[in-house]
Image (cartoon, rainbow, N blue to C red):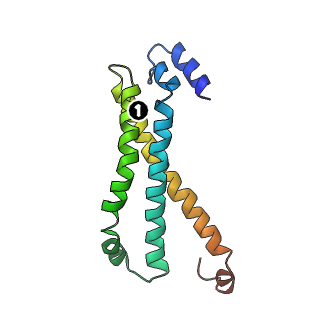
């Protein structure tokens, strides 16, 4: 797929991404690392929010206050991955194409976060729906 993208970019008069970025050995692993970091961060925050509200009975305000301490440690842990990934992507970009690299970087963050919420949330809800407890109380979905 990346090969097809590289061929297409080489044929375009004004490609959005420099063709060399697509084939760079540091660029795509860095994008995947950025997406993976946000997959985990956003997925876990989503699950924590649902857990606190549905299992512990917290209100939305109580949940927000309970989660206030979470971002600093998780951000510190995620920062190593995200900063390294962002740096690798920007270094792989040719001169004058850092904007394209930054756009792919941001897209990787957003895509990773959205997939984290969808995949981890979906798996958690599927597991909850198939539990014996859920079968006894059909009103709780």
Residue at the spot 40% in from the left edge and 46% down from the top edge: 81
Residue at the spot 47% in from the left edge and 72% down from the top edge: 50
Most foreground residue, 25 or 130: 25
Q: In this view, does 98 lie to the left or right of 12?
A: left
**Count of numbered tags:** 1
Q: Is residue 76 above or below residue 104?
A: below
| Furthest-bottom residue in this view | 136
Most foreground residue, 28 or 114: 28
- Residue on which the image places disc 1: 89
Quadrant where the image shows the N terminus: top right
Q: In this view, does 15 lie above or below 62?
A: above
Q: In this view, does 82 lie above or below 90?
A: below
Quadrant where the image shows the C terminus: bottom right
| Residue 117 image position (x, y, % from top left) | 50, 58
Residue at the spot 44% in from the left edge and 20% down from the top edge: 18
Residue at the spot 54% in from the left edge and 13% down from the top edge: 11
Q: Residues within 10 Å of mark 1 (few under 14, many from 20)?
A: many
Most foreground residue, 46 or 69: 69
| Residue 125 image position (x, y, % from top left) | 59, 69
| Residue 115 image position (x, y, % from top left) | 53, 52
């Amino acid at each position: 797929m990346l090969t097809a993208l590289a061929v297409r970019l080489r044929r375009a008069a004004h490609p959005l991404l420099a063709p060399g970025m697509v084939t760079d050995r540091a660029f795509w692993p860095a994008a995947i690392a950025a997406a993976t970091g946000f997959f985990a961060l956003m997925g876990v925050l989503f699950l924590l929010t649902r857990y606190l509200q549905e299992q512990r009975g917290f209100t939305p305000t109580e949940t927000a206050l309970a989660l206030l301490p979470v971002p600093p440690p998780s951000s510190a842990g995620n920062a190593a991955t995200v900063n390294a990934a962002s740096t690798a992507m920007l270094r792989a970009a040719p001169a004058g194409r850092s904007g394209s690299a930054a756009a792919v970087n941001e897209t990787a963050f957003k895509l990773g976060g959205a997939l984290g919420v969808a995949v981890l949330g979906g798996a958690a809800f599927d597991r909850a729906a198939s539990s014996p407890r859920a079968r006894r109380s059909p009103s709780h979905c």
